[in-house]
Image (cartoon, rainbow, N blue to C red):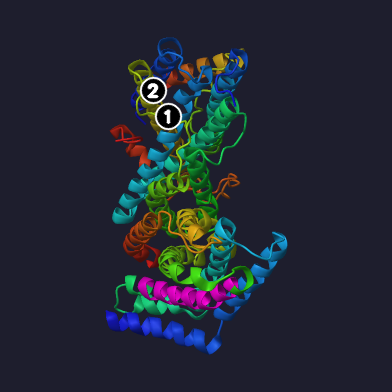
Amino acid sequence: MDPVLALSEAEGYVAGAYLAFAALLLIYLAIMAAKLARIQRELRELAESTGAPQPPKPKRKAGRASRAQRREVEAARREAQR
Amino acid sequence: MTDAYLALLGKDLRVELRTLRSLPAMALFAVTVFVVFRFGLDRTGLEGELAAGVLVVTLLFAGILAINRLFVAERDEGGFELVRLAPLDRTVLYAAKASALLLYLIALELIAVPVFALFFLDSAAALPPLIPVLLLADLGLALIGTLISTIATMSSARDLLAPLILLPLLVPLVIATAGAAEPVLRAGGPEYERFGTWLAVLGLYDGVFALVGYAVFDFLLED
Amino acid sequence: MSTPSLRTLALAAATLLVGGYALAFFYAPIEAEGFIQKIFYLHVPLAVVALLGFILAAVHSIRHLRSGDGVHDARSYVSIHISVVFAVGALATGALWAKGQWGVWWEWREPTLVSFLIVFLLYATYYPLRYSIEDRDRQARYASVFAITAGAFVPLNFLAVRLADPFIHPRTFSSAGGLPGEMLLAFLVCLAGMALLWATLVWFELASKAASGDLAKLRRALLPSEQPPPAPRRAVAPAGVSAMSTDLGDGAGGRS
């Protein structure tokens, strides 16, 4: 077997190897992200059922709802301080 | 301590001799596997690599049968509690069980190896050089087998788990045993290629796992 | 949870990896083997770090058995987990290298690949072992015994497999000896980066497990009458996982 391959074929395998590594890493991170999401969800549920103040929802989509919620929490805090 | 060791070892051997739980099955299994190989490989004579491979693999699998059953009595009849309550170093149980297993393996080979020579080899000249190789291999198999058998006994999937964990661990043993046996089993008469090296590897393997087994066995019986 | 330490670790890993691969592609020369040799900078660090991770896991397990503290068992568990992931990476990149260099997806005469396969098969049994033992303490103890035995096995395995092939394959992968200066530098930087990546992932997973454990404790404390939530698919929680939330600041998640 000729060890010095045509550049295009060798490049393909090199790229494949690095892509495989990247894919492995990203899949692992995706699994960890899913676990984190589950922990956050359970924390929220726990807070709800014990009546504790809601932790802020993740800022991914800063929609009107969460901004309004934050304003409410701040207003409540100001009220408590008075 | 030697008293306890001899007592435990004697008990195991006496039980085995009386009930013949493992030995006949192991020997029969080995002979049957030889027959299967004869047909699976479609050969009536074996030499060199093929002979070494068939012999080592068959002995390995027969040994695993024994390993699976090593602690059956202890598990069913409360032998572990007895050992835990008795004022002795638990490592003595490890030594006794490993010695028993070693003796079973030697007994197995006393039957299976001549049968192998009868079935597949031209002459028995290859057998004497195999003795040190197989002895060292048996020692390694006994040391590691007892340890893993203890682990598997306490788990729920014991029959499946023990071989699953054992086989990768035994690969160096297989490499060294087959490596030493292959030149010995050549058609023209026994040759010795790197015989010393392979014996050294087997010795190292045995030494390392004797130390590991001695160090960790205690923790398996804690409760 | 002291996130600054984890952040620093992650940044250091990223810097070294990016730097290392930049060196590998733009600074290190292309040798006689051709461009395919560039996989060396990925495959060998993955393999070396995975092996060191397995041995480190054995060290954690020794500490676990000696102290009985579940923290070490958690570290051992996660170390093995990440090392197994890296081992899969080593096998995949090794296969691609073999295909690119020799035209075959697998090569029995390449001792590193074969040793790695055996080590991977061994550590893959770690999970069935853990899942099959119900009692948490016993599970942790037995897992530690396994990790120590397997750690002792790794060097023996490499020795035996290497001896099995009497002729060193002329075009072997792992010829790290006799590397020209530029290649050695690139390789060392990649190796260091991969090691830090391993440490980062271990620390990350340990933190995640600690959070899960703390959450479960909190739930039990606040809602004692509630049914426990449906157990996650991986119902294995290494003993002592929740004790780690106080432990993350000491920077001991990865290689010491």
Task: Provide residue C33's location: percent of width, then percent of height.
Answer: 50, 21
Residue bounds of the magenta highlight? B94-117
C-alpha separation, residue under disc 2 versus residue under disc 1: 8 Å
Instruction: Looking at the picture, tell me which residue is in the foreground, C89 or B88.
Output: C89
Instruction: Indicate the amino acid at tag 1.
Output: Pro
x 58%, y 65%: residue: B58
Residue A60 is covered by the magenta coloring: no
Task: Provide residue C138's location: percent of width, then percent of height.
Answer: 43, 60
Whether residue C134 is visible to the viewer of this picture, yes or no, is no
Task: Provide residue C104's location: percent of width, then percent of height.
Answer: 62, 32
* Residue bearing mark 2: C187
Whether residue B161 is situated above or below residue C28 in the rendered picture: below
Whether residue C99 is visible to the viewer of this picture, yes or no, is yes
Instruction: Looking at the picture, tell me which residue is in the foreground, B89 or C109.
Output: C109
Task: Provide residue B129's location: percent of width, then percent of height.
Answer: 44, 68
Discs 2, 1 touching: Cβ within 8 Å: yes
Quadrant for the C terminus of chain B, please. bottom left
Residue B105 is covered by the magenta coloring: yes
Q: Which mark is residue A75?
A: none
Q: Mark 2 or mark 1: which comes first in sequence? A: 1
x 45%, y 84%: residue: B13
Whether residue C12 is situated above or below residue C145 in the rendered picture: above
Prevailing secondary structure class for the magenta stretch in the rendered image: helix
Instruction: Looking at the picture, tell me which residue is in the foreground, C240 or B47.
Output: B47
The outermost residue toward the left is B1
The reply, left or right, for residue A44 in relation to residue C153 is right
Q: Chain of mark 2?
A: C
Instruction: Indicate the amino acid at tag 2.
Output: Phe
- Disc 2 residue crowd, few under 14, some 14–19, many 20+, Cα 10 Å: many
Q: Which mark is residue C45?
A: 1
